[in-house]
Structure formats: C-alpha cells, structure tokens
C-alpha cells in the first residue's frame, strides 16, 4: 500500500461512522468563558472549567481534534523534553524545578483523569529512556543527571546493558522516565470534548473566531453568530494566529516536527526491537522519539525544521518521511526494507527556553493563553488546562509562574 502523506493515522483509522458532529455557532450562547481551539488542550480546558461549574463554550474553526493534537505522538511524558541544565541557566533553579515537578504531576494526573472518565483512548503505562549513543552524548547525559539530582529531581542513570535489553539499542547509557503513558491522542480529544459537553460545556465546530475587542471593563468575541461578551477568553490554539495575536508571534520560532508510522512488521522482527511499553528518545538534536503502536508498528518523530511555505509542504513531507525511515533503520537495522504507512508533519511554536507560555499577558487583560508547547509529548495539554483554571480562579501557585510570559 502506498504511503499516505499529510494524514494523521489516528484520524484516518478512526471509524468514520463514529466521529461525533458538533453544531456550528448559529446563536449567541450565554457563557462566562470562551475557549478558542478544539484540540487536546482546548477540550481538556473546557472539561476542567465545566467540571468546576463555570459556564464555558468552546469554538473550533475546523473539526474537533483535527489539528496538532491528531498530529502528535500520543506520548504522556513525565518531563518537558528539554534539558533541565539548559532551562536552569535561563530561568533559575527554583523555576526550573517547579516546571519539572509540575510536568511529572501532570503526567500522573492526566493518566488518572483518563481512567476516571473511562476515555477509550488506548491508555497504556509506558516508561521512557533518554539514550546516549556516543561519548559526547554520555558526557551531556551525566551532566544532565547531575543537574537534576542536585535540584532534588528523579534522575536514574541506566547502564548500557539495560539499554540493550530493554530498548534493543547499543546505547552507552540512558536516563529513565517512569511515570509516562501512551494514548491515541485523537480519541483522547474526542473523549474530553464529550466529557466537557456532559458537564454542560457548549462545543461548536466549524465556527472560527474572526475578531476580539476589549476595553478596561469587558471583552467581545466575534463568533459566526455575532459578538459575545464574556469575562474570560482562553486561547488554546498552540500558536498565536496572525489574524488575532500577531503582536505575540515575536516570542516564538515556528517549526515543524515530522512523524512516520511503519507498516505492520513481521513477528520475528518485532521480537528483536525491545520492550513494547517503552518510549525511546535519543540525545541527538533534533531528537527522535520512538514508540510502538498496536504492538506491531513503530512510530518515529523528529527531523524538525523551520515550518515551510504551504507550496513546499507536500515535497517536504515526502523528503522528511524518507529521512525518518532511514534514520530509524540506523537505530534499528533489522527494520531495513519496512515501508512507511504514514508520513505527516506536526507544526509547533518554540520559546527561548523550550517551555510553553501558559497564563496571562499584560497587554491582554481578559485573555489566558496556552502557546509554545514544543514538547514531543501531550502532557502539556493537561498541564495547561489546570494552570488556566487556577489563573481564572485567582488560585495560581508558585509552580505556575515557571510557565508565565514574564519569566
């Protein structure tokens, strides 16, 4: 079967007859909070606000879960995916420690929420290994372990023998992550949207927000049905859109990660490729993230670039998918000859520290934002939903400051 480029396997393999349909906004709802963006972050936020008894409406310009959420790896990681030692230098020890502790707590709580809501998103517990394969990478890995341990964070160094046994990679060492998981991100997004609706949230699809205006006293959100006056606007589009928040785009670099999902592999090859309940991330830059899907396919992400112009996207997808498959074969030579079933891109916004901006901005008094999550995991979506709710309730804690625009 030919490779399907530019299509998310999570969406493509979901039964079309079961895809929920939410209405377009045809009347102006009476709500206190508007959430803009119907991805994993937006749906998790709508659920958090609705569960807290807040009248909330979510507006998605296209279809629920069809954006960056369905282009993700579906990995619930217990750390942000950047080097602690680098972040510590930029924002200080205390803030960096808060960020790592908050991320790990979010990973645990996200898994617990999925279980409590009984979301059918194929949740599986999964540890991780951050693998070093060269002497230079080992030096950086040990420096990272030292920085984390001195900050009081978990930093277990894994011996080369264990890396070979568990990941089937001739690594020279690794840092272990214990508290992660794997999900189907599209199913998780749909599940959270349904849970939010069951709690009273209003969900609108194909309902783009065209304009936002505000004074010192109120804000108006211009929906397809007309202007809606609200007390709070939650912007969970992942990146500041040029139509609404052009002034904030200077805070970010705009990049794309690429993903490839293999065809099902023969049982003999699968047996040579390590444990299934394990996510492998290497120490190259940009790094690769490798996980199993359905116990018979490998998903690899990486090959990050500056986001290309739309006219170059198709060509770049083909080139980067081929590059990823080649790089995967250098990590696992036994898969040589296995073809990619899917190749797709995942755009994101990158901040100077690699941590997302979650919370308020002084120039937008009624807004709360969730921008710049460049982590290779989906943990930041749940983390953002909790931070945004705390900000709205004026209950932000010290750890939340690590993700603020003011850092």
Image: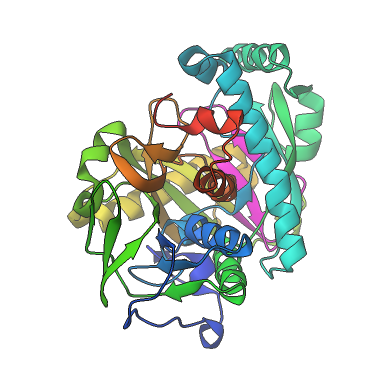
Say whether residue 227 is left or right of residue 19: left
Snapshot quadrant of residue 199: bottom right
Write the residue at 62% across / 71% down: 195
Write the residue at 56% across / 13% down: 136
Write the residue at 56% across / 16% down: 85
Determine if the magenta segment contains residue 61: no
Residue 106 at x, y percent in the picture = 66, 43
Determine if the magenta segment contains residue 281: yes
Q: Which residues are the magenta region?
A: 274-298
The C terminus, quarter of image: top left
Say whether residue 151 is left or right of residue 241: right
Residue 111 at x, y percent in the picture = 72, 53
Q: Is residue 347 above or below residue 128?
A: below
Q: Is 230 in front, or is 56?
A: 230
Q: From this viewpoint, which residue is outermost toward the front?
A: 217
Q: Is 348 in front, or is 221?
A: 221
Q: Identify the coloring.
A: rainbow
Say whether residue 263 is visible: no
Say whether residue 151 is visible: yes
Snapshot quadrant of residue 191: bottom right
Q: Is residue 349 above or below residue 20?
A: above
Residue 154 at x, y percent in the picture = 75, 24
Q: Is residue 187 above or below residue 101?
A: below
Write the residue at 41% across / 57% down: 344
């Amino acid at each position: 079967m030919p490779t399907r480029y530019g299509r998310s396997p999570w969406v493509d393999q979901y039964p079309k007859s079961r895809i929920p349909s939410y209405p377009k906004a045809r009347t102006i709802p009476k709500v206190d909070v508007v959430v803009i963006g119907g991805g994993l972050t937006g749906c998790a936020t709508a659920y958090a606000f609705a569960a807290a008894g807040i009248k909330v409406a979510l507006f998605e310009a296209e279809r629920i879960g069809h954006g960056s959420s369905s282009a993700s790896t579906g990995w619930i990681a217990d750390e942000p995916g950047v080097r602690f030692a680098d972040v510590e230098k930029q924002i200080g020890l205390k803030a960096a420690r808060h960020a790592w502790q908050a991320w790990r707590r979010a990973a645990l709580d996200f898994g617990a929420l999925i279980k409590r809501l009984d979301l059918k998103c194929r949740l599986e517990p999964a540890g991780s290994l951050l693998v070093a394969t060269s002497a230079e990478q080992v030096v950086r890995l040990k420096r990272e372990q030292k920085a984390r341990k001195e900050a009081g964070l978990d930093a277990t160094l894994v011996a080369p023998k264990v890396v070979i046994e568990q990941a089937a990679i001739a690594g020279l060492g690794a840092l272990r992550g214990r508290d992660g998981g794997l999900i189907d991100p599209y199913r998780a997004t749909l599940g959270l949207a349904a849970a939010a609706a069951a709690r009273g949230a209003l969900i609108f699809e194909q309902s783009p927000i065209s304009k936002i205006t505000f004074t010192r006293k109120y804000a108006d959100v211009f929906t397809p049905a007309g202007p809606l006056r609200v007390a709070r606007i939650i912007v969970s589009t992942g990146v500041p859109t040029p139509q609404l928040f052009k002034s904030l785009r200077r805070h970010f670099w705009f990049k794309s990660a690429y993903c490839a999902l293999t065809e099902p592999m023969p049982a003999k090859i699968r047996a040579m490729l390590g444990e299934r309940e394990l996510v492998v991330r290497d120490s190259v830059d940009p790094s690769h993230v490798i996980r199993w899907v359905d116990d018979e396919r490998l998903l690899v992400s990486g090959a990050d670039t500056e986001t290309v112009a739309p006219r170059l996207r198709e060509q770049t997808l083909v080139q980067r998918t081929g590059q990823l498959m080649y790089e995967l074969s250098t990590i696992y030579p036994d898969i040589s000859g296995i073809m990619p079933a899917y190749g797709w891109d995942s755009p994101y916004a990158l901040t100077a520290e690699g941590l997302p901006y979650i919370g308020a901005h002084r120039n937008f008094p009624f807004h709360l934002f969730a921008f710049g999550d460049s982590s290779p995991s989906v943990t930041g979506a749940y983390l953002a939903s909790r931070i945004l709710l705390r900000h709205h309730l004026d209950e932000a804690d010290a750890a939340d400051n690590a993700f603020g625009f003011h850092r």
